[in-house]
Every structure is written in C-alpha cells, then in structure tokens.
Amino acid sequence: MILFIQSNPVISSLIFSFTINMGFFAFAATLKTDKVTDLSYSLSFFILAPVLLFSAGNSYILEQLFLTISIMIWALRLGAYLLKRIITIGKDDRFDDKRNDFLKFLKFWILQTLVVWVVMLPFSLFLTARPVQTFPGSTITGLSVFLSGLIIESFSDAQKFTYRSKEGNKGHWVDTGLWRYSRHPNYFGEILVWWGLFIVVIPTLSGWGWLTVLGPVTITLFLLKVSGIPLLEIQNEKKYGENPEFASYRKNTSLLIPLPTRRRK
C-alpha cells in the first residue's frame, strides 16, 4: 500500500481528498450543520499538501517544500477567515435546502472532493519530480504570481469583512478598497494562486503531465461559471437590483480583474 501511494501521487491524492472530505461530511451530516462546509474546503488543502509531500517518499527539492508551505499558508489564512465569517453570520444560506437532505448534502461533499483533487493535480504530479536541475525562472515567476494572488485575496476578504461588520453599511454592497475596482477581487486572487502554482510546475511537465493544467482551469471555471461569481451576482441582484447606485456600480466596475472604474453617472 505504501509503495502504491508513493508511485501513484495522483491516485493517492484522490484517496486522501475523499477521506478528508468524507470525515467532514460525517461530522456535518450527523450534526446537520453547515458551519464546517467552507472551512473544510481550505482545510482539505492544508492537510492534503503535507500528507502528499511526506507520503511521496522522495528526497525533497526546494520547490516542493516551497509549494507545500505556500499552499498551507494560503489554506490556513482562508480557513481562519471562513471560520470567523461563519461564526459571525451563524449559518450559510446556500445550504438551507441541503443540510437536512442526506443525498443533496452528500453530493456537495463529493463535488468538493473532486474539485480539491483536480485543483491539486499539478502539485501531486510535481512530487514525482527529481532534483536533476533547478529552474529558478519558473519558480520565481510562479511563486510571485502565487504571492500576488494570496495578497489580493487576503486584502479583499479583510476589506469585505470589515465593511460588513460596520452597522452603518448594512444593506449596502462592498465598494471600497479593491472592491471599488472589481466586483469579485477575492476570486481573482484565488485564481492567481493556482495559476502561480502551475507555473512553478511547468518545467517538469511532459506528455500526459500537461493535463494537470486542468487544476487551474477547473478552479477558474468553477469560480467564473459555477458556484462562485454566478451565485453571488444573482444574490446581489436580488438584494440591490432596484438601487440605481448598484446598477451604476455593476455597469462601471470590472467583474473580476481589478481595473480603473469607468466614470459613473
């Protein structure tokens, strides 16, 4: 079993991701709570990265250690933020129709298992890389993109939480800080994080290994087209759609990439 895990990092990543998420599912389903749903997403990466590194059984190269630590820092920061947020708001409205429905709830955790596994594909395969040569160009570029994404996501989340914590801002959308230039800067930051990781891995890729680009592509499409931006855009339209100031903000502010705003009329 140990030899199988060491020689099949992609399969072992799926096994570990499934085990981690099913553990959280068992806890959440038993208590019928959604307080660990978002938290489990970040903790999956926090646990999976070092577990995969140590189970790979290789003599580690600098890039592998750097990526492991980087993923853990990103996951720890996001997990702390999500935990603080759910404690503050009490519950996640997205799960009102799921937390008491076993199959619907299970479907969420299975989907999350697969997303975590696919997003971690570049890292999983990278653990098989041998210290034949160093590649500082791609490493520096990739880690710079990763760090930029981490900073953008961190500032965006902090600004959003601070804004919504103020009583006077109740019933108003976040339009300060990075949110003045993007309607979803936190998602832009997360997308940069995973593309940065992929850039580090590029020099080790060949043949079927290039399919690991599915990692950053998946998180990008997931946030742009599935559960991230689309859900929030619908939610914001329901909350603020009749407000002409929100219509102006939406029309003149970039959806994802922070850009100078158009002059609002």
Image: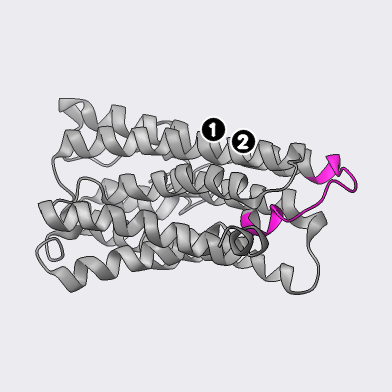
| Residue beneath the point at 43% across and 33% down | 77
Query: Is residue 188 positioned above or below 165 on the image?
Result: below
Residue at the right extreme of this rendering: 133
Assign the N terminus to one quadrant of the image.
bottom right
- Relative to 193, 154 lies left or right: left
- Relative to 109, 96 lies left or right: left
Q: What stretch is highlighted in magenta?
A: 124-138
**Residue 132 on the magenta segment:** yes
| Residue beneath the point at 19% across and 35% down | 87
- Quadrant of residue 68 in the image? top right
Asked if the residue under mark 1 is in contact with the one under mark 2, i.e. CB atoms within 8 Å, the reply is yes
- Percent across and percent down for residue 99 are 14, 60
Residue bearing mark 2: 147
Dot 2 alpha-carbon crowd within 10 angstroms: few under 14, some 14 to 19, many 20 or more: some
Whether residue 250 appears in this view of the structure is yes
**Residue 160 on the magenta segment:** no
| Residue beneath the point at 16% across and 38% down | 89
Judged from the image, the secondary structure of the residue bearing numbered disc 1 is helix
Residue type at mark 1?
Ile
Give the number of the disc on residue 151: 1
Query: Is residue 163 positioned above or below 186 on the image?
Result: above
Closest to the observer: 206 or 144?
206
Query: Is residue 228 positioned above or below 265 on the image?
Result: below
Query: Is residue 236 positioned above or below 50 on the image?
Result: below
Our reading of the magenta stretch's main secondary structure is loop
Closest to the observer: 105 or 223?
105
Closest to the observer: 104 or 55?
55
Dot 1 alpha-carbon crowd within 10 angstroms: few under 14, some 14 to 19, many 20 or more: some
- Relative to 193, 126 lies left or right: right
- Percent across and percent down for residue 235 are 23, 57
Give the number of the disc on residue 239: none
- Percent across and percent down for residue 94 are 20, 58
